[in-house]
Image (cartoon, rainbow, N blue to C red):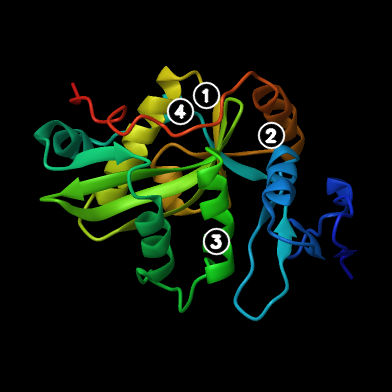
C-alpha cells in the first residue's frame, strides 16, 4: 500500500518507494506549480494514465544523460550538418506538448499527458520553468521535446517526431545548449533502449540525488530561452 498524499502534505521519504513497480512512491496531491517544483527538486515526477489518481515516482536506478555525453551517430551528424531542419527554443510550447500527447508511439495505446498535465506544464512554461525544443521544416513543426529546468538541472519529459531524425535533432541541440549553459545533467527518468542509444545511462538513486541537490541549488533565472539559441550551424 502506497501513501495517499493529501493537499499540502509533504512527500514521503524516497526510501519508501516500491521496488515493483520500480519507484512508485505515493498517490494523490495536485499538479500545482508549487507541488511540481517541490517534486522535481526532490527527484520525484508525476506519471499516471487517464482515470488513475496522480501517481508520483522516483525509480532506482535513474536514467540520466550528461550533456557532454550525448552520442551523435554518423547519420545524425550528417543530418545536423545538412541544415534540413530549423531548431527553435520556446517558440511554440503548446504545440509541442500537444504533439507529445497525440502522436502515436509504437507499443503504446494511449498517453499519460492528459489535458490536466498539459495545463500544469503550460503554467510552468508561463513561469519560465518549463521549456520546449522544436524541430521545424518548411514552416511546419515536425519534432521536438519539452521538460523542466531548475538551477543547472534539466528534467526531460517527452518527445515526438513526425519526420525521420526530427526528435534526435531536437535532443542533440538541447544537449549542446545545456552544455554551453553549464547544465550538469538531464533526467531521463526511465531506462529505454532509445535513450541508451543517445548516450543516457543508469545511475543509482543515491548518486542521482546527491548530484541533483548540487545542481538545483545553483543560481538560476527562470525565463524564456532565446528562440534562436539552439539554431547555430552544426560543425
Lower position in the chain sequence, tag 1 or tag 3: 3
Lower position in the chain sequence, tag 1 or tag 4: 4
Q: Position of residue 60 (x, y in %)?
A: 71, 47
Q: Position of residue 156 (x, y in %)?
A: 51, 45
- Image quarter where the N terminus lies is bottom right
- How far apart, in angstroms, are the residues tagged by discs 2 and 3? 28 Å
Task: Give the class, few, some or many, for how many residues have Cα within 10 Å of label 1's Cα (few <14, many ≥20).
Answer: many
Q: Which residue is mark 2?
A: 208
Lower position in the chain sequence, tag 2 or tag 4: 4
Q: Which mark is residue 145?
A: none
Q: Which residue is mark 3?
A: 119
- Image quarter where the C terminus lies is top left
Task: Give the class, few, some or many, for how many residues have Cα within 10 Å of label 3's Cα (few <14, many ≥20).
Answer: some
Q: Nearer the viewer, mark 2 or mark 1?
A: 1
Q: Nearer the viewer, mark 3 or mark 4?
A: 3
- How far apart, in angstroms, are the residues tagged by discs 3 and 4? 28 Å
In the displayed structure image, the side of residue 90 where residue 235 appears, left or right: left
Q: Which residue is mark 1?
A: 183
Q: Which residue is mark 4?
A: 67
Q: Nearer the viewer, mark 2 or mark 3?
A: 3
Q: Nearer the viewer, mark 1 or mark 4?
A: 1
Amino acid at each position: 500500500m502506497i501513501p495517499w498524499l493529501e493537499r499540502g502534505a509533504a512527500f514521503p521519504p524516497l526510501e519508501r518507494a516500491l521496488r515493483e513497480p520500480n519507484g512508485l512512491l505515493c498517490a494523490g496531491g495536485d499538479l500545482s506549480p508549487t507541488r511540481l517544483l517541490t517534486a522535481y527538486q526532490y527527484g520525484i515526477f508525476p506519471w499516471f494514465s487517464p482515470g488513475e489518481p496522480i501517481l508520483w515516482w522516483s525509480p532506482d536506478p535513474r536514467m540520466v544523460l550528461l550533456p557532454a555525453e550525448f552520442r551523435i551517430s554518423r547519420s545524425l551528424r550528417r543530418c545536423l550538418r545538412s541544415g534540413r531542419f530549423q531548431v527553435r527554443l520556446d517558440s511554440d510550447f503548446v504545440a509541442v506538448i500537444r504533439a507529445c500527447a497525440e502522436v502515436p508511439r509504437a507499443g503504446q495505446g494511449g498517453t499519460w499527458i492528459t489535458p490536466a498535465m498539459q495545463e500544469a506544464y503550460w503554467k510552468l512554461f508561463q513561469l519560465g520553468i518549463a521549456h520546449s525544443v522544436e524541430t521545424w521544416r518548411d514552416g511546419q513543426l515536425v519534432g521536438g521535446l519539452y521538460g523542466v529546468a531548475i538551477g543547472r538541472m534539466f528534467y526531460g519529459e517527452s518527445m515526438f517526431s513526425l519526420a525521420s531524425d526530427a526528435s534526435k535533432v531536437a535532443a542533440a541541440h538541447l544537449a549542446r545548449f545545456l552544455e554551453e549553459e553549464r547544465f550538469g545533467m538531464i533526467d531521463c527518468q526511465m531506462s529505454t533502449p532509445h535513450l541508451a542509444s543517445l548516450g543516457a545511462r543508469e545511475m543509482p538513486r543515491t548518486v542521482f540525488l546527491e548530484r541533483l541537490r548540487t545542481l538545483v541549488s545553483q543560481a538560476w533565472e527562470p525565463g524564456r530561452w532565446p528562440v534562436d539559441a539552439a539554431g547555430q550551424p552544426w560543425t
